[in-house]
Image (cartoon, rainbow, N blue to C red):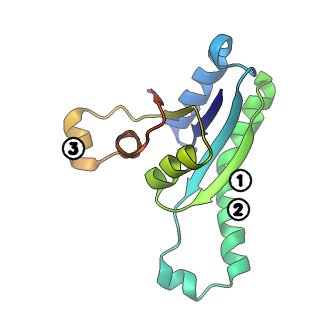
Amino acid sequence: MKILVCVDGSEFTRRMVAYWAAHEEWLGNQHQFTVLTVVQAIPPRAAAVLDREVLNSYYADEGEKTFKPIRTFLDKQGLSATYLSKTGPVAEVIARTAREEDFDLVMMGSHGHSELGTLVMGSVATRVLASCKTPVLLIR
């Protein structure tokens, strides 16, 4: 099974990764894991005045900041994954990646907002659920 693990470096990501490690019996290395982080794009006007190499370096550095503690933790747990950093609107990028790369499952942490909180604030998880045809496992 190809599993897309979506991370942002938050406490909710740490909980989800801990859940993954604790449930190795069904989330172990028999699956192919890709850890995805999506870096918010620099606004177009600001990006226009930056050198393309500087901009790409910034995006790569931001992705690596998110991956570093996760990579360390997964290595200690004996879990292997590939790492993928993309740029753009988070929910759209997650759904598009899951579809275009034929993932069987999307796994992500959730803040667990109440229905009212989600209605008022919105949620990446809610937008992914609405736009993704791939099954999504939310871990709170």
Q: Is residue 83 left or right of residue 135?
A: right
The C terminus, quarter of image: top left
Q: Amino acid at mark 3?
A: Leu
Q: Which residue is mark 2?
A: 60
Residue shown at 70%/40% (left/top)? 69
Q: Is residue 72 visible?
A: yes
Image height of 47 relative to 111, above or below: below
Residue shown at 66%/41% (left/top)? 35
**Mark 2 and mark 1 in contact (Cβ < 8 Å)?**
yes
Q: Position of residue 43 (x, y in %)?
A: 48, 76
Q: Amino acid at mark 2?
A: Ala
Q: Earlier in the sequence, mark 3 or mark 2?
A: 2
Residue shown at 22%/34% (left/top)? 115
Q: Which residue is mark 3?
A: 119
Q: Within 10 Å of the Cα at label 2, are there few (<14), some (14-19), or many (20+) other Cα atoms?
A: some
Q: Position of residue 5 (x, y in %)?
A: 60, 36
Q: Position of residue 31 (x, y in %)?
A: 70, 25
What secondary structure is found at the residue carrying circle 1? Answer: helix
Q: Which residue is mark 1?
A: 64
Q: Earlier in the sequence, mark 3 or mark 1?
A: 1
Q: Position of residue 94 (x, y in %)?
A: 51, 48
Q: Amino acid at mark 1?
A: Glu
